[in-house]
């Protein structure tokens, strides 16, 4: 004898699961946007300007394998007696090995640097919150429709 759940009893659990999943996805997307905005603000307000020596760059290719997608460069820099050899964020163009570039180090994460020229135009924005807002609005609509259906 199998105990099966009837479709009418299963439906609320499925609906609730979908609503919770949408809410969690919205929250995660908003958290990523918040973290990125916080990093940009932190770099602008308390970032540490340094000079880094370029150790080398590797070309990146696009998804098809035939299109260039910029470069990933590594650099060496020192801060308070510690030496770092890390990826330099914001490198879209090839940087000559051995050249010196201006970078901004994240004060909260000394192993993260970005080209000063790449950071300059970056601003915090509300754009990362648009998708989560629509997800939450859709979620609220689903909750309302489920509530309305139950209370007819």
Image (cartoon, rainbow, N blue to C red):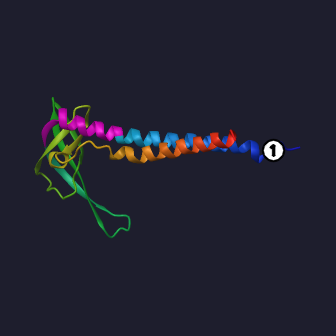
Quadrant the C terminus occupies: top right
Q: Position of residue 53 (x, y in %)?
A: 14, 46
Residue at the image position 10 percent from the left and 51 percent from the top: 99
Residue 5, compared with residue 80, is above or below; it is: below
Q: Is residue 45 magenta?
A: yes
Quadrant the N terminus occupies: top right
Q: Residue furthest bottom?
A: 66
Residue at the image position 40 percent from the left and 40 percent from the top: 30
Q: Is residue 24 left or right of residue 12?
A: left
Q: Position of residue 150 (x, y in %)?
A: 69, 40
Q: Using the image as rendered, state which of residue 128 and residue 107 is in the foreground.
A: 128
Q: Which residues are magenta?
A: 34-51
Q: Position of residue 40 (x, y in %)?
A: 25, 40
User: Badge 1, how many Cα within 10 Å: few under 14, some, many 20+?
Assistant: few
Instruction: Please tell me how many numbered marks the rendered image carries.
Output: 1
Residue at the image position 12 percent from the left and 48 percent from the top: 101
Q: Position of residue 51 (x, y in %)?
A: 11, 42
Q: Residue furthest right?
A: 1
Residue 39, compared with residue 120, is above or below; it is: above
Task: Write down the residue under mark 1.
Answer: 4
Q: Residue furthest top?
A: 80
Q: Is residue 101 left or right of residue 114?
A: left
Q: Using the image as rendered, state which of residue 135 and residue 55 is in the foreground.
A: 135
Our reading of the magenta stretch's main secondary structure is helix
At mark 1, the secondary structure is loop
Residue 91, compared with residue 137, is above or below; it is: below
Q: Quadrant of residue 52?
A: top left
Q: Is residue 150 magenta?
A: no
Q: Is residue 7 left or right of residue 37?
A: right
Residue at the image position 48 percent from the left and 46 percent from the top: 135
């Amino acid at each position: 004898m199998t105990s099966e759940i009837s479709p009418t009893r299963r439906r609320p659990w499925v609906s609730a699961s979908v609503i919770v999943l949408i809410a969690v996805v919205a929250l995660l997307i908003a958290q990523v946007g918040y973290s990125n905005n916080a990093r940009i603000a932190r770099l602008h307000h308390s970032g540490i300007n340094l000079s880094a020596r370029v150790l080398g760059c590797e070309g990146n290719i696009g998804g098809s394998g035939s299109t260039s997608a910029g470069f990933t460069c590594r650099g060496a820099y020192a801060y308070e007696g510690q030496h770092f050899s890390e990826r330099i964020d914001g490198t879209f163009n090839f940087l000559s090995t051995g050249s010196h570039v201006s970078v901004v180090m994240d004060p909260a994460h000394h192993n993260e640097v970005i080209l000063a020229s790449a950071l300059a135009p970056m601003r915090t924005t509300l754009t990362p919150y648009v998708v989560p807002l629509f997800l939450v609005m859709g979620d609220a609509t689903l909750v309302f429709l489920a509530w309305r259906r139950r209370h007819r």
